[in-house]
Image: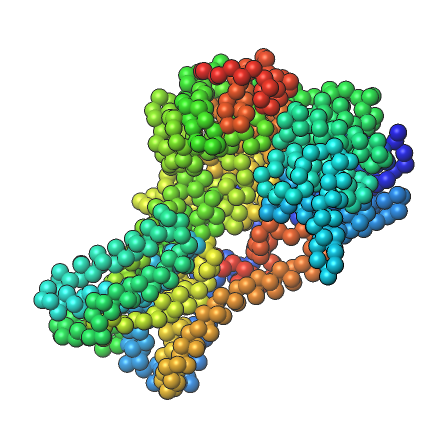
Amino acid sequence: MPGAAVLALEDVSKSFGAVAALRGARLELRAGEAHALVGENGAGKSTLVKILAGVHAPDAGRVLLDGQPVHLDGPAAARAAGIAVIYQEPTLFPDLSVAENIFMGRQPLGGGRRIDRKELHARCAALFERLGVRLDPERPARGLSIADQQMVEIAKALSFDARVLVMDEPTAALSGVEVERLFTVARALRDGGAAVLFISHRFEEVFDLCDRITVMRDGQWVATDDAADLTVDQVVRLMVGRDVSSLFPKQDVEPGEVVLSVRGLTRRGVFSDVSFDVRAGEIVALAGLVGAGRSEVVRAVFGVDAYDEGSVEVAGRPLRPGRPAAAMAAGVALVPEDRRQQGLVMELSVERNATLTRRWQLARGGLLSSRAERATAAEWSTKLQVKAGKLADPVSTLSGGNQQKVVLAKWLSTNPRVLIVDEPTRGIDVGTKAEVHRLLSQLAADGLAVVMVSSELPEVLGMADRVLVMHEGRLVDDIPRARADEGSVMLAATGQGRTTAVAP
Amino acid sequence: MAVDTTPATPAGQAPAQRPRTASRLRLLGSGDAVITGVLVLFLVVAALTVEGFASARNTGFLLLDVVVIVLIALPLTLVIVTGEIDLSVASTVGLSSAVMGQLWFSGLPLETVIPLCLLLGAMLGAVNGFFVTRLGLPSLAVTIGTLALYRGLAFVVLGDRAVADFPRSWTTWAISGIGGTGIPVVVVPLLFLVLLTGVVLHATPIGRSLYAMGNSEDAARFSGIDVGRTKFWLFVVTGVVSALGGIYWTLRYGSARADNAQGLELQVIAAILLGGVSIFGGRGGLLGVLAGALLLGSVRNALQLENVPADVLNIVTGGLLVVAVVAPQVAARVRSRTRARPAGPPSAPPARPAPDAHPSTDPAAQVPADQRGNR
């Protein structure tokens, strides 16, 4: 039975440098409700959570607790206000016991101000009792499953008498049974009068658990409605702000011959027996949950990481393992997952970054001139419409979307036959995102073989000719465009789909 | 997003507001300009106030003292730009000097001894490179170890003996001047090596990859740069050049001793850091290093002329080393503070301290901001 508003955000804005993460965000949480917050990656959900958690202070706008403005100037203040945040991957002290983790800093004290272990464990057991969780308070936190770690965090929140429980994508790494248990606990807390804020990309969970849904887009509040009055289609449309089909303009291309062929690729403990083919003109998506081993596979293909078994062939010729330079010579390009660490040398200029992959080709008689570098960089930044003040400026001064364009320029200028993109649109604005999608589609139409690792299901479904799904280091499904939908991909990704061995 | 709504500036064209002086300084390698200015200033003041400083004879001595420092600083600059360090260079000088003495003593001709010593240097460098790049150990720890190890081996080879009967023709050549100028003849091949290193560092694909890996090893690897192999060969080259320094040192003083060039690594590193090369890698230029070495040598030389005792010279070297490391940090902090003030309270801390992300429009503040001579 939803009651009065416990916590509210009013027109909250927050910028990081030139990037506006939140622009007039709104949220109202009522006692006794489960409230979903949905939006695309980069919509500002995480920033909003961090404001609630007291990690960031808003630049503008107000945070209201029971109708009174509060300043959450630090995690301690948020905790004192009764706000608890459960992150996707909790950070517990691995060597301390479960009970010590829960009561860190406020352990019950016995005689001589020593920690009263008996009381500590009794209190912890009482919390677990309330949650209906079977966990030994004395065991160390190391080795707990993610689901159990979240339970420890929830128990901690309970021990603070939290009135607002924020769960930031808690189910991303959970199995079906674990999700059910988490929801049981969340419902119990909700029925006990707490407000639960649930953030997820999985719509069936959102509709299963939540009473109301708030949609965000580009850092702004879009809508808040009762879940009963909304459909998945409506929510998606609110999230992207337009029809999905126009966002992902994949052109139909008749695939050519096989360009990239991966056979039995294995890296012990990371992925095993991965085999697939990619044809010219094809966009093949690698889908799966975070940690399924997708990035690791493409890194091994490119040669940045070593692998134990298997082979990679480009246009019928075997690729030397563990040597990115050999992969580049064979026409493979990798736009890596982490733009700031792997894609770019942030301290170097735009032009140096854009030409780093072509420095030998641009040299005349072994000598590189700044003029040649600048000319090449200028050519590509015009082609990809990179918005940069000066090409001599450090690439760190560019926005995320433009940085990603520089990474793309850096690799497209090598004239590749196989383009591997790992999370190509992560953390970039919607406008640039559409440009990247159009570009990838165009490149495939021009005969490039494109491998796209993406955690964004709409992107996968909209762009890919085929979806390869990985689960726990194995390729579990190969779904053609016609059969690919949210259900089939998600089922395979969570390991519940048909686990036919994929033999290309 | 605000950035994306602005019209694109024509790519590749620098807007006109860039200060002229800054672009001119950039020709010098920007940050290098500061240290070059300090050097010129010091030379002028010393010439006017220190008796005998500007004489041809003293200039010759000064240059002879600086030759080995500059020589070893060349490869070591490349090593430091990649974010590594080699502290064993002076011990390599000592060991190759000792081996040179022992081999000459046992009757081999210098024409055979010298290549053998260079080979030895390559091997000593390869040992460093192996531990750093194959076993992934930090170069600081590895080369502290080999600093002691190589020096120890030098004493094993030669003990506390000295071999001094090298042919007069070689030893006089080592200190002879060009005509009557007092400038040593070895300056000519040295200048050639300086030029070569400068070109490699600033105008070749290799140089670009050194700056890339010095700033971000990950990003360099993802760009197809073989970081391990490059660093390995840099250590080998540093070993060879250090051995060359050992050979020259021996001829110059006409004496092979195990304790030759003890502590020289501090002077070399001080010269490099004074020249504006970042100890964290990725930043700096060779011109600055050259100026740094000359400044350090001139200061020591001027103090010697003023009869300052040797202990004080070491204090000065150490002090300059500390200044070289601390000054850029302080400058960066001052800059970020002066910039933060007009912009109001700082919004979000940058992911990594990048003080020169937004160059100040004040040309005076810009000079140290661009301590990255790789343009």
In percent of the image, x 37 and y 57: which residue is there?
B142
Name the quadrant containing residue A497.
top right
* Residue A253: percent from left, percent from top: 51, 16
**Colouring:** rainbow
Q: Is residue A215 visible?
A: no
Position of residue B278 in the picture relative to residue A233 (left or right): left
Out of B179 and B72, give the one closest to the viewer. Answer: B72
Q: In screen coordinates, is A300 left or right of B110?
A: right
Q: Is residue A100 visible?
A: yes
Name the side, left or right, on which A102 lies relative to A313.
right
| Residue A219 screen position, x and y as percent | 73, 37
Residue depicted at x 38% and y 62%? B144
Residue A316 picture location, percent across and down: 35, 21
* In the image, residue A184 above or below residue A487: below
Residue at 56% from the left image edge and 37% from the top image edge: A404
Res A40 → quadrant: top right
In the figure, B151 relative to A454: above or below?
Answer: below
For the residue pair B103 and B170, the one nearer the viewer reads as B103
